Amino acid sequence: MILCGCEDHHEVKYLFNSIDIYCFDNRAAHVINDHLVLVADSLRQKERNLNNKIPLSSGKILIQSEGAEIFYRDIWIQSIEKFPY
């Protein structure tokens, strides 16, 4: 299940946004400039060479932009003890 807010919480052009992404078990939350904008629950991935779907609870981290130039700074990765949302 994915819940997504409709409001735009991005800063004006040429300013940096603060983006927090929380992942715990098979859930994720995206927070932009201190506003919760997306919650994903029951995340699953297709098991290699099988049609089974298994919980997505580990894997690689990918940060990307689709079709636009993007700059990153001050990226921190830290463990959390529980899902905050």
Image (spheres, grey):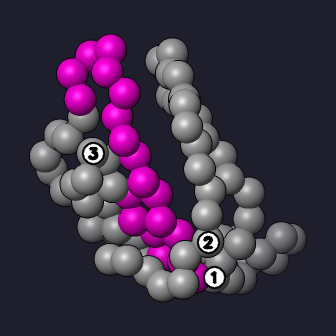
Residue at 61% over, 64% down: 78
Q: CA distance from mark 3 to mark 2?
A: 21 Å
Residue closest to the eye, 32 or 57: 32
Quarter of the image containing the N terminus? bottom left
* Amino acid found under the numbered disc labelled 1: Pro
Residue at 58% over, 42% down: 75
* Amino acid found under the numbered disc labelled 3: Asn
Residue 18 location in percent, x, y? 36, 41
Give the magenta part as a residue range. 11-30
Q: Is residue 81 above or below residue 63?
A: below
**Label 1, on which residue?**
55
* Amino acid found under the numbered disc labelled 2: Ser
Residue closest to the eye, 31 or 46: 31
**Label 3, on which residue?**
33
Does residue 32 appear to the left or right of 44 in the view shown? Answer: left
Query: Which circle, 3 or 1, is nearer the viewer?
Result: 3
Confirm or deny contact between disc 2 and disc 1 (CB under 8 A): no
**Label 2, on which residue?**
79
User: Alpha-carbon neighbours of circle 2 within 10 Å: few (<14), some, or many (≥20)?
Assistant: few
Q: Quadrant of residue 48?
A: bottom right
Query: Which circle, 2 or 1, is nearer the viewer?
Result: 2
Residue at 24% over, 34% down: 10
Q: CA distance from mark 2 to mark 1?
A: 19 Å
| Secondary structure of residue under mark 1 | strand
